[in-house]
Structure formats: structure tokens, C-alpha cells
């Protein structure tokens, strides 16, 4: 049941952005940025899971973390708020079409696996891995 609720809550996308690991990376207008001194460089990349169409891209530029997120199913972008970093990444996501709001935390489990915990309109814990999905609309 949490998978279905999570899928309904995760509906968001847009035009491709530069690689988050690139020193020249500039995130799309749907991204937010925050100071994150000491952040683990393994967070940088594009992440998704098998139980949702939600995709999360994190980039690191010096001591700053940026993030963008979209639904790879229909291309809708998430609205992002209150991005933070302290022993993990924290962000509030809202899907505009459904107005579902989730509090998300992301923690690395090795260099190629991440655990996402959500609360709010749905609750659950999800395994994420690196993916190659790109946004499909602006």
C-alpha cells in the first residue's frame, strides 16, 4: 500500500540538466541549493527506485548541495522546499498536480545505494540506486 501511495505522491519532470558532478553544472529552475560543508561526494548523481517513478538528482558544487526532482512517468517537476544537510539530505517535496507533500530524508548506504524515508501524505522507506533517467518536459 505504501508503494501505491508513494507513486501517487511522486509525479514530477522537465528538460535535461547538466551532470551534477560537472564543475560547470547549473541546475534547472526547479532546483534548490543550500550550503552543505563536508557533504559526501557520493550523493552527487541521479537516483531512483523500482517502486516509484520519482527521480532525484543531487549535485555538489564546492560546499553547496543542489537538488532537482521529477516524475519520470509523466514529466512533472516536484516543488522543493527546505533542503538541508546534516548526516543526510532532508527536503520537503510537493507534487503540484496532487498537492501531496512529503518530508524526505536520504542517507547513503555505500556509494551506489541510498535509503529514502518519507513521511507526511505517505510514509515508508525505499531503496534507491543510481539511474540514467532524464526529465522529459520543461
Image (cartoon, rainbow, N blue to C red):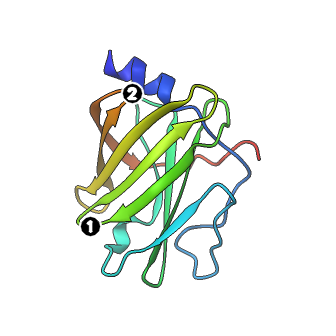
Q: Between 57 and 113, which is closer to the camera in this rendering?
A: 57
Separation (CA) of disc 1 from disc 2: 23 Å
Which residue is drawn at the image coordinates 29% and 29% (left, top)? 123
Rendering coords of residue 58 (x, y %): 48, 62
- Where residue 111 is drawn, which disc sits there? none
Which residue is drawn at the image coordinates 66% and 66% (left, top)? 18
What residue did someone put label 2 on? 121
Q: Between 104 and 15, which is closer to the camera in this rendering?
A: 104
Which residue is drawn at the image coordinates 66% and 37% (left, top)? 76
Image check: 85 left or right of 17? left
What residue did someone put label 1 on? 86
Image check: 42 left or right of 97? left
Give residue 52's quadrant in the image. Answer: top left
Asked if residue 1 is positioned above or below residue 69 in the image, the reply reads: above
Give residue 99's quadrant in the image. Answer: top right
> Looking at this rendering, what residue extends furthest in the top direction?
1
Local secondary structure at mark 2: loop
Image check: 44 left or right of 87? right
In which quadrant of the rendered image does the N terminus lie?
top left
Asked if residue 52 is positioned above or below residue 110 in the image, the reply reads: above
Image check: 132 left or right of 75? left
Q: Between 39 and 42, which is closer to the camera in this rendering?
A: 39
Q: Nearer the N terminus, badge 1 or badge 2? A: 1
Give residue 119's quadrant in the image. Answer: top left
- Few, some or many residues within 10 Å of mark 2 (<14, 14–19, 20+): some
Marks 1 and 2 in Cβ contact (< 8 Å):
no
- Few, some or many residues within 10 Å of mark 1 (<14, 14–19, 20+): few
Rendering coords of residue 62 (x, y %): 47, 85
Asked if residue 84 is positioned above or below residue 56 in the image, the reply reads: below
| Count of numbered marks | 2
Which residue is drawn at the image coordinates 41% and 18% (left, top)? 4
Amino acid at each position: 500500500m505504501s508503494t501505491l501511495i508513494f507513486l501517487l505522491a511522486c509525479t514530477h519532470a522537465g528538460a535535461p540538466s547538466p551532470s551534477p558532478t560537472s564543475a560547470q553544472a547549473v541546475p534547472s529552475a526547479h532546483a534548490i541549493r543550500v550550503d552543505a560543508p563536508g557533504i559526501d561526494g557520493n550523493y552527487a548523481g541521479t537516483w531512483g527506485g523500482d517502486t516509484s517513478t520519482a527521480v532525484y538528482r543531487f549535485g555538489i558544487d564546492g560546499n553547496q548541495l543542489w537538488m532537482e526532482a521529477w516524475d519520470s512517468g509523466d514529466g512533472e517537476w516536484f516543488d522543493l522546499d527546505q533542503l538541508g544537510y546534516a548526516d543526510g539530505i532532508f527536503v520537503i517535496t510537493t507534487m503540484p498536480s496532487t498537492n501531496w507533500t512529503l518530508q524526505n530524508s536520504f542517507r547513503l548506504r555505500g556509494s551506489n545505494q541510498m535509503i529514502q524515508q518519507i513521511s507526511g501524505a505517505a510514509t515508508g522507506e525505499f531503496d534507491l540506486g543510481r539511474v540514467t533517467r532524464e526529465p522529459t518536459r520543461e
